[in-house]
């Protein structure tokens, strides 16, 4: 199947599920059942019936039995009155019918295998022939508010997986099983990296010393790459008057997503959801000459977005987002050189972790200009500049029409993690609109004011989300340079502690993050504990090591014997300096 055929098959399976539900639960009220990236789901009001994962086997069996009878879809256009009659008693379908009629759109009912549903279309032409009965599986049950609004009734959502073949389905299930083992929420807790507190609130992670060390090491790495290319650090406050975001254009689009503060003097402030408008004010604080251009500002700081509680998920979706943010203010003639420098930083950073990058050109959709800031001429200029940039880099890109930020087009970098999941990892965004709104200019060679351009460039994007990605990509096995504890020393007996302390002091003097575990637990238990914490190197010291002044080192993959302390330190220092991905 191609992607369109697969999407149609998934949508068809949502209908097939709905029929199975109605066969077994006649009083159930169907609502919406779309196709999604890995399959389909249907939201259902089961009334007093309780449906859980245990019921999915029977529903799946019914779906496979009915599939052979699903040979072709038919559809008919009906009036709002007839549609109301067909779905009388189902308040959810009636609400949808009123919305469709209110928009002046056609109301269509699709039927297959004797089952009829309200639908716009997009199905397999002959489901029994096109859909393999062993290429789909009902996956799990979850709760979902009607229309995603927590003020509405909680429905039961049944998720299904669907692919072109059984082999693809099995591969996906295997991937998901591996993903559970790598879940950053599970590993983050086991490795002592971050915690959540009910008193602090959901979506607000608290970072332990171990987790903070990794965050800062990542951020220092990004800063070292930026510093080499002429960036300077700036600092801004965490709140602002609403007027700043009204001028930038963010207030009109994102007002409902902001945390707002009403002062005792009745002023309205917002917790910043992004940093770019603040940075414009630093640029605009003095008159700029063409000789001052470009200005490159970098800042790692938190922003805040009022996400719905049901959308929060570990580190990947939070309320407090730490951005390794940067904005370049430059002339149009400098766009290419500045954007290419950012591209170099992105490639260097992600190659360090084994990510292979693809490019998506995320541009605006001319069919929906109301979603974007600025006119068609501004968008054409910005998109032409990014296209020229990609052509100069000689890359093949994915066309991402409709994926632009509301203020400008962007180059999104896409990769896959170690178990094959697709990720968006970094972005270069070109913005002509905010400089225009804030009247940002420099004086050019002719003594005239020239509007500048703004380039947004967050390398990790969100440190929280990148950490969730990295933990799962590496299964918690951080390279030496990132590991909170790089070496654990385990003396076998008390008589070995003097030599163990000598080795410990030597490593400590070289700024190696080392722990001496001379506790009273057995040697085996101490070694297991070090390995459970995914320590890159565990040194075991006994008579042989003490007497010969050597080390026995266990890595994640091998055992190294009779290595001198000096050789081991040299190896560590090389791996740390080169940021080796071991």
Image (cartoon, helix red, strand yellow):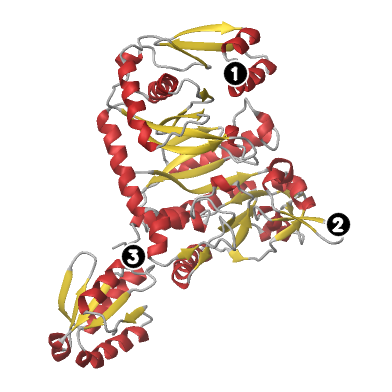
The residue pinned by badge 2 equals 266
> Are the residues at dot 1 and dot 3 in contact (C-beta closer than 8 Å)?
no
- Tell me which corner region of the image, top left, top right, bottom left or bottom right, holds residue 138: top left
User: How many residues crowd around disc 2 within 10 Å: few (fewer than 14), some, or many (20 or more)?
Assistant: few
Q: Residue at x 54, y 25 (%)?
A: 31
Left of 274 or right of it: where is 438?
right
Please state which of residues 567 and 154 is positioned toward the viewer in this rendering. 154
The residue pinned by badge 3 equals 479
**Is residue 543 in view?**
yes
The residue pinned by badge 1 equals 89
Left of 308 or right of it: where is 49?
left
Left of 90 or right of it: where is 417?
left
Please tell me whether mark 1 sits on a helix, a strand or a loop: loop
- Tell me which corner region of the image, top left, top right, bottom left or bottom right, holds residue 23: top left
Q: Position of residue 284 (x, y in %)?
A: 75, 57
Task: Report the Cα–Cα distance between label 3 and label 2.
Answer: 51 Å
Left of 127 or right of it: where is 445?
right
Q: Position of residue 420 (x, y in %)?
A: 33, 44
Mark earlier in primary sequence (3, 2): 2
Picture layout, residue 353 above or below residue 71: below
Mark earlier in primary sequence (1, 3): 1
Please tell me whether mark 3 sits on a helix, a strand or a loop: loop
Give the mark toward the camera: 2 or 1: 1
> Are the residues at dot 3 and dot 2 in contact (C-beta closer than 8 Å)?
no
């Amino acid at each position: 199947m191609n992607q369109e055929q697969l999407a149609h098959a998934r949508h068809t399976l949502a209908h097939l599920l709905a029929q199975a539900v109605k066969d077994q639960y006649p009083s159930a009220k169907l609502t919406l059942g779309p196709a999604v990236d890995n399959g389909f789901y249907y939201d259902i009001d089961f009334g007093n019936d309780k449906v859980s994962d245990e019921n999915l086997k029977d529903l799946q069996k019914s779906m496979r039995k009915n599939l052979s009878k699903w040979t072709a879809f038919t559809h008919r256009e009906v009036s709002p009155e007839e549609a109301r009659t067909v779905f009388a008693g189902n308040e959810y379908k009636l609400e949808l019918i009123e919305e469709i009629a209110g928009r002046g759109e056609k109301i269509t009912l699709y039927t297959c295998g004797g089952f009829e549903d309200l639908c716009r279309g997009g199905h397999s032409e002959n489901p029994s022939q096109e859909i393999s009965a062993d290429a789909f599986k009902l996956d799990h049950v979850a709760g979902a508010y009607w229309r995603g609004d927590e003020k509405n009734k909680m429905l039961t959502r049944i998720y299904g997986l669907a692919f072109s073949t059984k082999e693809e389905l099995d591969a996906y299930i295997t991937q998901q099983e591996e993903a559970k083992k790598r879940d950053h929420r599970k590993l983050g807790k086991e490795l002592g990296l971050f915690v959540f507190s009910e008193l602090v609130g959901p979506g607000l992670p608290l970072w332990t010393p171990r987790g903070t060390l990794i965050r800062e090491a990542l951020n220092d790495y990004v800063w070292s790459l930026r510093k080499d290319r002429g960036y300077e650090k700036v600092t801004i406050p965490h709140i602002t008057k609403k007027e700043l975001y009204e001028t930038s254009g963010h207030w009109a689009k994102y007002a409902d997503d902001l945390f707002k503060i009403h002062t005792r003097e009745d002023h309205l402030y917002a917790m910043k959801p992004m940093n770019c408008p603040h940075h414009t004010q630093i640029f605009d604080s003095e008159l700029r000459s063409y000789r001052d251009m470009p200005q490159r500002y970098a800042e790692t700081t938190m922003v805040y977005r009022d996400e719905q509680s049901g959308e929060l998920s570990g580190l990947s979706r939070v309320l407090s987002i730490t951005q390794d943010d940067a904005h370049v203010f430059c002339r149009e003639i400098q766009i290419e050189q500045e954007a290419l420098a950012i591209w170099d930083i992105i490639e260097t950073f992600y190659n360090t972790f084994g990510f292979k990058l693809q490019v998506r050109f995320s541009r605006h959709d001319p069919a929906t200009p109301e979603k974007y800031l600025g006119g068609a001429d501004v968008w054409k200029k910005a998109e032409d500049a990014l296209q020229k940039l990609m052509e100069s880099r000689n890359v093949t890109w994915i066309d991402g029409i409709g994926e632009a930020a509301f203020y400008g087009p962007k180059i999104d970098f896409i990769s896959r993690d170690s178990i094959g999941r697709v990720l968006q990892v970094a972005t270069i965004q070109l913005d002509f609109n905010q400089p225009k709104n804030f009247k940002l200019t420099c004086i050019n060679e002719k003594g005239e004011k020239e509007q500048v351009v703004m380039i947004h460039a967050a390398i990790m994007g969100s440190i929280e989300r990148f950490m969730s990605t990295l933990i799962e990509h590496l299964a918690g096995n951080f390279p030496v340079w990132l590991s909170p504890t790089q070496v654990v020393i385990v003396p076998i007996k008390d008589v070995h502690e003097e030599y163990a302390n000598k080795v410990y002091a030597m490593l400590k003097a070289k700024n190696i993050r080392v722990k001496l575990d001379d506790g009273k637990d057995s040697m085996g238990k101490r070694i297991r504990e070090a390995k459970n914490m995914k320590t890159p190197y565990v040194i075991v010291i006994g008579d042989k090591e003490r007497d010969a002044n050597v080390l026995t080192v266990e890595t994640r993959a091998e055992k190294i014997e009779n290595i001198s302390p000096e050789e081991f330190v040299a190896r560590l220092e090389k791996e740390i300096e080169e940021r080796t991905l071991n």
